[in-house]
Amino acid sequence: MSALDDLVSQIARLPGLGRKSAVRIAHYLLKSDRRVAGNLSELLATLHDRIHPCSECGRYTEADPCAVCSDSARDRTVICVVEQPQDVEVLEQSGEFHGLYHVLGGVLSPIDGIGPGELRVAALYRRIEQLGIREVILATNPTVEGDTTALYLVKQLQTRGVDCSRLALGLPVGGDLEYADRLTVARSLRGRTHYDS
Amino acid sequence: MGFSQIRYYQFRNIADGVLAFDAKQIFFVGDNGQGKTNLLESFYILCYGSTFRTNRDSLLIRSGMSDCGLTGTAVTDDSGELAIRFALQNSLKSIHVNGSPVQDRKDLIHNLPCIVFCHDDIDFVSGPPERRRWFFNQTLSLYDELFIDVLRRYTRILKNRNVAVREENGDMIDVLDEQLAHTGRELQVQREHAVERFSATFEQLYHHISGFDEPLRVRYRPSWRNLDSVESVVKELRTRRSTDFTMGTTTSGPHRDRFRFEMNGKEFTETASTGQLRLISLILRVAQARFFSGRSGRKPVLLLDDVMLELDPTRRKRFFDALPDYDQAVFTFLPDEQFSSLAGDDTLLYRVKAGHAYGESGSASTRSV
Ligand SMILES: [Zn+2]
């Protein structure tokens, strides 16, 4: 395999890119000034040294704890639970939410062997206790497993006397948070449904 | 109006080339093993993106070859002209409509609804309960696009619950019970309503085509009986949990629903003759097609593969006349069958021999590529 083939197949493994786009990107890099590839490779090489999951909320950050977790102006009685680190960025961009976040790192899925132990669930309970959280907003995606996860957490949290609500994403079925626009996120935050305890 | 032409490439035993189908009725006449069902199957594949004859797609490829393709040009009322391309390459299947890839086969079905009548349909009547569920799931999917979503959700929840049951994971089952009850009730209600209406059409057709006076009805027997709320289902699941643990699976729910053919309150198929079973299976398909047309206001493409053979001439004529209005209908016949009396003003007849289709005039109508 040639170096170019190797590069193309590495790029094609990235999410959302097919072989055609991979070829286009590889050729673009070859045609551009060598500094373009140099800068990119330097960024990639130090990526894992500079960026870590926040030890509190789990989103990616350079400083630990992250800007949200260390911001004293945030409402520390509300926590929003999401599946993936990038979901935090979507909610942050809406500018509508002023509480804290918690990234689970996935969803409960017995078929795939993913139980609470495989997710950051214990860390969530610990933070709720330490911070004295009063409301938990469950913002997992509206998929079967996203619902399972939300429902599971509601059952566990209600016994701890925490108020729970579910983000009502005004999206078609299967619409993930990742693809929601700012307005939709803002609307669904305001229209969240509370679970009866 | 259905398909105006289909291009064949290394598809089963069919000669490479283009066949013209710009007629309301297409008759493929030939002895067994010559390829008439393969030709009929090509229509189905372009409508559904899969075949009704096998689970192994590789069988669609001419033996000794590594890929095959079908390209159909279809004219529909709402989407205009469609170019549907089906290809199997390196055991990868791809479907394109007007050049865009189709991700979910569900989207394809609604482009060009198609209903097939085939020999195995008798399983819906005399086969195991899951074949009947399959038939009614398909009917409901044609009827309501959202049904497939609910069914897929249910199946996913069920699979998760079965794993949790095997692990005897109580906390997880508590959660999944609520989801299963909620989605399962949705399925149950949809099935209830659909079967009620379906049965009315079916009963009338059966009476008309069979000529029998005793009414034959379709009855829905849900697994969750007399439970008409999500809460009552959750309670039932709770009660049955220890049974589920023993059996290592979820022992109640819509995946265990039954559909019965009842005459005088008894399951009719246990005492019916083979001829009666065949007739019921044909009528199921007619009812399905009518049900679909009535709801959507759209006309389906009908594919009838060798299914009228077992009917006597009177019932054959009545059955033929009872078919719902269609965009296009494709029939296969054996050479000695009485098919000419069934031909209309707009019928195209192909004689099929060793993978070649010849127009009735006798000239080969496959153009070489
Ligand atoms: Zn943080």
Image (cartoon, coloured by chain):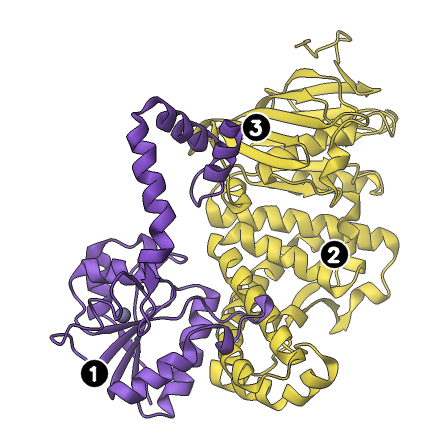
Chain colours: A purple, B yellow
* CA distance for labels 3 and 1: 56 Å
Asked where in the image residue B114 lies, by quadrant, the reply is top right
Residue contact at pointers 1 and 2, CB within 8 angstroms: no
Of helix, strand and loop, which one carries label 3? strand
* Residue A77 circle label: 1
Q: Is residue A118 above or below residue B139?
A: below
- Residue B257 visible, this angle: no
- Residue A5 visible, this angle: yes
Q: Nearer the viewer, mark 3 or mark 1?
A: 1
> What is the crowding at mark 1: few (fewer than 14 residues within 10 Å), some, or many (at least 20)?
some
Q: Which residue is mark 2?
A: B124
Asked where in the image residue B44 lies, by quadrant, the reply is top right
Q: Is residue B257 above or below residue B76?
A: below
Amino acid type of the residue that numbered disc 1 sits on in the rendered structure: Thr
Q: Is residue B336 above or below residue B145?
A: above
* CA distance for labels 3 and 2: 30 Å
Q: Which residue is mark 3?
A: B85
